[in-house]
Amino acid sequence: MVLRENADVERRTRRTVRILVFAASLRSASLNGSLSGLAARVAEQKGAMVTRARMADFDCASYNEDQEDASGMPAGARRLHDLLIANDAFMIASPEYNASMPGVLKNVIDWVSRMRPQPFNGRQGLLLSASPSMAGGNRGLWALRVPLEHLGARIYPDMFSLAQAHEAFGPDGRIANPTLQERFDETLDCFLDLVEAAQHYHALRKQWIEFLGEKPDPATNRTEETHVNAA
Ligand SMILES: Cc1cc2nc3c(=O)[nH]c(=O)nc-3n(C[C@H](O)[C@H](O)[C@H](O)COP(=O)(O)O)c2cc1C
């Protein structure tokens, strides 16, 4: 109980963290849209500055290097890039499609990975999913970790996958099962603590080298220093 009271004091004094929140579904009645809306509200209640976006804002033509050479970055990729740069961290609620992430999300990750600064590098991320299935779309999140971590994002070890999501929400938009709602709140709270620590305290240094063992060569170097600790 003492620990909980101390934690509450810390929460009231949390320094500002800026979080981008979106659902990786284009569907108007998206379950992941509901979960990302809940995540945004909970994060705001816990003192975060939240920017919400929609997957439609980031939708791009299929990645094509010829198109990149001819016309540069599509507007959707630039929007995601700019929002990532403007925030300390991101939360994505992603559907699971065939045990992986939706193609529309992987596609915009591919586009954004071509931009410099490469904005996933050094950013903290929390992955959420909602699905009517019993596993809640959790397999898709394991697949989503791979490109994000490859790009240098710090993906939080815990994830939250809402099973049977079509019947999981109450009329107030919260998770009807109070124990699950409490777990959700705690996961976000722990994540926000880490974002705050990474952003405001000198605890984390990193560099991003896309191909670790590659012979250093200016023609192929894909290396970036990141200052994630600037107070
Ligand atoms: C192409 C496709 C593949 C799917 N594959 C899975 C799957 O592998 N696992 C799963 O739990 N649900 C799967 N589903 C069901 C989705 O979880 C369900 O449609 C969910 O509501 C999509 O998320 P949304 O409501 O945020 O749009 C799939 C749906 C589609 C359209």
Image (tube, rainbow, N blue to C red):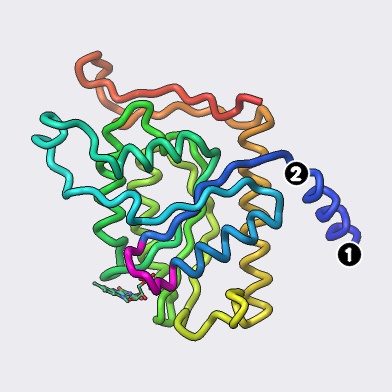
First in sequence: mark 2 vs mark 1: 1
In the displayed structure, 26 sits above or below 90; it is below
Residue 219 counted in the magenta span: no
Residue pictured at 50% horizontal, 74% vertical: 162
Residue range highlighted in magenta? 25-32
Q: Residues within 10 Å of mark 2 (few under 14, many from 20)?
A: some
Left-right relation of 32 to 47: left
- The image quadrant that residue 195 belongs to is top right
**Image coords of residue 31 (percent x, y):** 43, 73
Residue 10 pos. (x, y %): 81, 48
Amino acid under disc 1: Met
User: Is label 1 in a helix, a strand or a loop?
Assistant: loop
208 relative to 52, above or below: above
Residue neighbourhood size for the residue with mark 1, other residues' Cα within 10 Å, grouped as few (<14), some (14–19), many (≥20):
few
Q: Amino acid at mark 2?
A: Arg
Q: Residue at x 38, y 27 (%)?
A: 117
Q: Nearer the viewer, residue 123 or 173?
A: 173
How many marks the image carries: the answer is 2
Q: Residue at x 68, y 40 (%)?
A: 16
Q: Nearer the viewer, residue 164 or 41?
A: 41
Residue under label 1:
1
In terms of depth relative to the viewer, which is nearer, 35 or 27? 27
Residue 14 image label: 2
Do labels 2 and 1 touch, CB within 8 Å?
A: no
- Image-quadrant location for residue 228: top right
Is residue 210 rendered to the left or right of residue 171? Answer: left
Q: Please name whichever residue, 7 or 48, is drawn nearer the observer in this view of the structure.
A: 48
